[in-house]
Amino acid sequence: MKKIKIHIRKLAGNEDLSLPRYMTNMASGMDIFAAVAEDEIIEPGQRKKITTGIAIALPEGYEAQIRPRSGLAIKSGITLLNSPGTIDADYRGEIALIVINHGNESFVVQRGMRLAQMVVQKICQVDWVEVDDLNETLRGQGGFGHT
């Protein structure tokens, strides 16, 4: 598996938190951690911005996707809005999560809690070529539920 080096900075006051890390040898996503100063309670139906205490410098041609953790989703109804969130290669600010509680009970976010996953991927940009007609396919214009 190819590895790349990416610069990461713990923001002041977050030296105690773990860096994002893979929980298994073949995981594609790294768990990232909540940097709340004190417990944050998210009530059912409520959303909150939760900081992670880190900033990264992705190389040109890469993005980081921020995704929910399936265990939190199934056990507590906790997920992320704007999922997956995108961190662009030119962004240098703190990574934050928009966490929503779709569950039936209050959810407590604690400092250092594994709250989301980050997947780093290569990307490409598109140069559009406008045409009058597109090539035909068997599916054609079959949309939602077509297959």
Image (cartoon, helix red, strand yellow):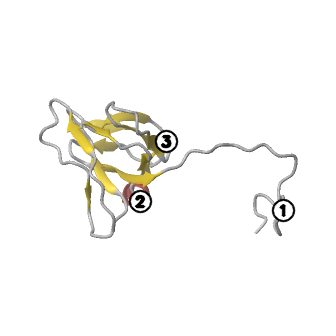
| Horizontal and vertical percent position of residue 108 | 29, 43
Callout 2 touching callout 3 (CB < 8 Å): no
Task: Determine the residue positioned at 79% across, 65% down.
Answer: 146
Kindly identify the amino acid type of the residue bearing the numbered disc 3.
Answer: Leu
| Horizontal and vertical percent position of residue 16 | 12, 41
User: Residue 144 appears in which quarter of the rendering?
Assistant: bottom right
User: Residue 138 appears in which quarter of the rendering?
Assistant: bottom right
- Asked whether, in this view, residue 22 is left or right of residue 106, the answer is left
Q: Number of labelled discs?
A: 3
Asked whether 144 or 105 is in front, the reply is 144
Task: Determine the residue positioned at 31% across, 56% down.
Answer: 30
Q: Is residue 114 above or below residue 93?
A: below
Quarter of the image with the C terminus is bottom right
Asked whether 9 or 122 is in front, the reply is 122
Q: Is residue 6 above or below residue 23?
A: above
Asked whether 44 or 127 is in front, the reply is 127
Sequence-wise, which precedes: disc 2 or disc 1?
2
Q: What residue is pinned by disc 1?
A: 140
Task: Determine the residue positioned at 51% across, 41% down.
Answer: 82
Residue 129 is marked as none
